[in-house]
Image (cartoon, rainbow, N blue to C red):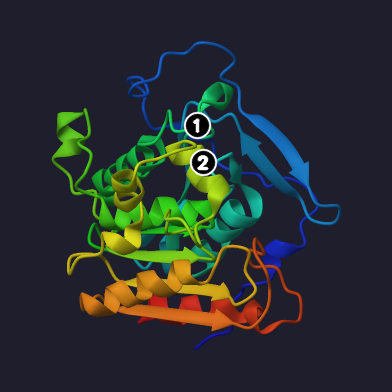
Amino acid sequence: MADTPTRFALMHDAPYDVPEEEFIWPEGVPGFEPDGDNTPVVKERGEKLYCRFISNIRIPSLTAFPAKAENNTGKAVVVCPGGGYSGVAIDHEGYDIARFFNSQGISAFILQYRCPAPDGRHGLWREGPLSDALRSIRLVRSRAAQYGIDPNKIGVMGFSSGGHVAATASTLYGLLEDPNPALNAISARPDFSILIYSVISLYEGYCHIGSRHNLLGLAPSFDLMKQYSPEKQVTPETPPVFMALTEDDAVHPLNSINYYAACLQNHVPAEMHIYPEGGHGYGMRVRGLAIDSWIDRLAEWIKR
């Protein structure tokens, strides 16, 4: 296998030149009436790396990074950055990953999904992130010919709470209809999923409580927690999955472990890599740890 160019995107100290984002609900965001300042809030994080965090995402968008014709494999991934359902880490869990996928001949589409709910109204946009992900998958599939994509090779990827978005899209893809009849006729099921240090379960005990509060509210019912805990929603139709995480992650490893077990029980192809240390939120950062190689394992998995 050729050397995997996984490190070039990690030392930037200025913003990327990125394509213009597209609002995925041009006809109006379902269930949302503009009632204030709808401008996303951008904050810089980190002293050495350019790492922006975007919050107040009320009008979700998708940024396309098509693969170049000379190495296009026909595969595509909708990428959901993390942020505890309070925003998205757009650079190291978005644009960095898009550049990696492009180097592998894979088109990438970075999703800025709705979060957080305005004015601290936890749970107000419970269906928002999932709805945004499903529409994005349908949009990409509807434009497969335009981007040189195989409509049967479109996956979804997520980091941290974005992993929860990706996991719900992989298990609840039939839950929500699209209000656009033409798009609703297109399948929203991802063909594969990639979950990196992911929030998955929203049950008591080992869930990431901040993500649950932001998505479901402060006192969700048992039935609601079950519905939005993807490890409880896996079926034989759930798409194949690749997972990577560390033992010392602030998001408990049982999130991924239980999803992996549910996949095995349902005969869903699954590959999981658990590394001893590395914490949370590292993206593709190189720190001299074993976890640094997760992106290489992903490249191998995608080729298979």
Relative to 260, is 35 above or below?
Answer: above
Residue 160 in the image, given as x and y percentages of width and height: 54, 57
Q: Is residue 23 left or right of residue 275?
A: left
Q: Which three-letter amino acid code belongs to the residue tagged 1?
A: His
Mark 2 and mark 1 lie on one chain; the one further toward the N terminus is: 1
- Which disc, if any, is residue 122? 1
Neighbourhood count class around disc 1 (C-alpha, 10 Å): few under 14, some 14–19, many 20 upward = some
Relative to 177, is 212 above or below?
Answer: below
The answer to whether residue 78 shows anywhere in this view is no
SS for callout 2: helix
Q: Answer yes or no: do the residues labelled 2 and 1 have beta carbons within 8 Å?
A: yes
Residue 1 in the image, given as x and y percentages of width and height: 49, 88
Residue that carries the numbered disc 2 in the rendered image: 213
Image point 32% across, 44% down: which residue? 224
Name the quarter where the C terminus is drawn.
bottom left
Residue 183 in the image, given as x and y percentages of width and height: 20, 37
Relative to 150, is 172 above or below?
Answer: above
